[in-house]
Image (cartoon, grey):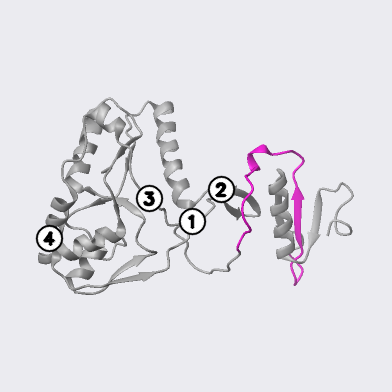
């Protein structure tokens, strides 16, 4: 493409292959340049694509080396995209950039946006980083492990574990979280402050505990572990202890008992 399909300035190249022009755009990003894609002649029956190499070196486009990409065609709504290396190649209106996982970036961006409004408009803001929370009035099918396990055991259905179940999670009872949020709101602190229960538990052990507490006859079945599933989730709550005088009071067994009782009557 570069040998025969460019302009004399060497900053625009053309191809009827959208795949080829897209690969060229990604190569530019990898070496630190930006290139915008557009349709060169919209009047033709077969599109001719043009990529314009911007005449500047863009450090903001630089990205660490990462594993081979995987291209998957998809037609539908995309709510969240996550990949194991946390780097995604995205494009809109012909302009492309590398960014982080949607879930990770959404949280990071929301905190940055809150702080921007705080600095510009002097608003009263608080940033709490909330970890796994559970309790009564959860939906059985909301995708979280506690209501999923309770719902399955109350029907004597098999409990589904992804992987071997040795990944760890921490679970904070809802009343403890509410107390933490209330103390943060009443304090002079802005945050971010982690709110969660620092007690770690393997998912397999949680399944066995819920089976025992419900008296169910459920078995455990295993399914493949998603590639981006974190091995552990445990909050560091030192700042919450020091600045808010807060830490969880409801232990897991107490919280699960209240939650199970609610599910039985819901």
Q: Which residue is mark 4?
A: 262
Dot 3 or dot 2: first in sequence order is 2
Q: What is the crowding at mark 2: few (fewer than 14 residues within 10 Å), some, or many (at least 20)?
A: some
Q: CA distance from mark 3 to mark 1?
A: 17 Å
- Front position among marks 3 and 2: 3
Q: Nearer the viewer, residue 32 or 149?
A: 149
Circle 1: element type: loop
Q: What is the crowding at mark 1: few (fewer than 14 residues within 10 Å), some, or many (at least 20)?
A: some
**Residue 263 visible from this viewpoint:** no
Circle 3: element type: loop
Q: CA distance from mark 3 to mark 4?
A: 28 Å
- The quarter of the displayed image where residue 196 is located: top left
Q: Which residue is mark 1?
A: 82
Q: Which residue is mark 2?
A: 99
Q: Which mark is residue 232?
A: 3
Circle 4: element type: helix
Dominant SS in magenta: loop
Coordinates of residue 25 in the picture (x, y in percent): 71, 54
């Amino acid at each position: 493409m570069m040998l025969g399909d460019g302009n004399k300035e060497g900053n625009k190249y053309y191809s009827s292959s959208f795949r080829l022009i897209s690969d060229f755009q990604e190569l530019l990003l990898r070496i630190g340049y930006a290139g915008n894609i557009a349709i060169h002649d919209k009047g033709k029956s077969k599109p001719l694509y043009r990529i314009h190499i911007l005449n500047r070196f863009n450090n903001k486009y630089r990205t660490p080396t990462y594993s081979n990409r995987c291209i998957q065609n998809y037609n539908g709504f995309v709510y969240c995209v996550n990949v194991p290396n946390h780097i995604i190649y995205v494009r809109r209106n012909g302009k492309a950039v590398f960014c982080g996982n949607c879930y990770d970036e959404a949280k990071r961006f929301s905190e940055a946006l809150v702080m921007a409004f705080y600095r510009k408009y002097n608003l009263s803001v608080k940033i709490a980083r909330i970890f796994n929370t559970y309790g009564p009035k959860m939906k059985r099918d909301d995708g979280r492990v506690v209501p999923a396990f309770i719902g399955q055991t109350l029907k004597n259905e098999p409990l589904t574990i992804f992987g071997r179940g040795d990944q760890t999670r921490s679970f904070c009872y809802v009343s403890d979280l509410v107390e933490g949020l209330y103390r943060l709101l009443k304090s002079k602190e802005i945050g971010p402050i982690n709110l969660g229960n620092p007690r770690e538990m393997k998912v397999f052990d949680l399944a066995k505990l819920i089976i025992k507490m419900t008296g169910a006859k459920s078995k455990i079945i295993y399914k493949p572990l998603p590639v981006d599933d974190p091995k552990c989730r445990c909050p560091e709550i030192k700042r919450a202890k020091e600045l808010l005088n807060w830490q969880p009071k409801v232990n897991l067994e107490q919280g699960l008992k209240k939650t199970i009782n609610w599910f039985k009557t819901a």
